[in-house]
Amino acid sequence: MEENIDKRLSTPIVSPLQSDHSPNYSARIAISREKASRVSKDQASPKGVQSLILPAVLLIVGFQLAMVGLAADVIAANRKLIEDVQYRVRKLELPAKDRSTYEN
């Protein structure tokens, strides 16, 4: 029992990256990292996704531009109607004001 304790105390502390179990441990880590990066790259960006990003963005911008154009057209039509109403109201009110000033 005392021999086991002495043996445990005498063995050097080894980090998880350095292992005495296998001489090719670091090589296996490098290979597994490379495989993991390949798998993550393949899953993260399939070949077709990159070619669809630009058209999707352009479609969104085009739709927004069309909506702004329609809003501007409606605002312009509304402004024309308001100007016409304002002209007619002034035309009707002007003679009434003139009559009231001359009657007094």
Image (cartoon, rainbow, N blue to C red):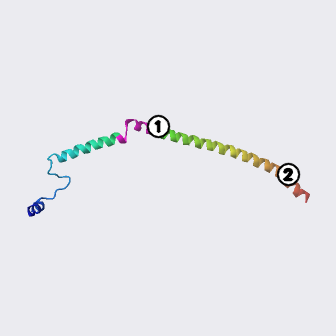
**Element type at marker 1?**
helix
**Element type at marker 2?**
helix
Most extreme residue toward the right is 103
Frontmost residue, 10 versus 86: 10
- Against 11, residue 84 (above or below) is above
The x, y position of residue 65, in whole percent, is 56, 41
Work out how far the residue at label 1 is from the one at label 2, CA to CA, in angstroms: 61 Å
- Against 1, residue 76 (above or below) is above
Q: Main secondary structure of the magenta part?
A: helix
User: Which of the marked residues, 1 or 2, is nearer the chain's N terminus?
Assistant: 1
Question: Which quarter of the figure has residue 40?
Answer: top left
Q: In the drawing, does residue 48 fall left or right of residue 6? A: right
Q: Is residue 45 magenta?
A: yes
Question: Which quarter of the figure has residue 9?
Answer: bottom left
Q: Is residue 48 magenta?
A: yes
Q: In the drawing, does residue 46 fall left or right of residue 34? A: right
Q: Label 2 belongs to which residue?
A: 95
Chain part drawn in magenta: 43-55
- Amino acid type of disc 2? Pro
* Label annotation for residue 55: 1
The x, y position of residue 84, in whole percent, is 75, 45
- Amino acid type of disc 1? Pro
Frontmost residue, 20 versus 42: 20
Assign the N terminus to one quadrant of the image.
bottom left
Q: Residue at image x 88%, y 57%? A: 100
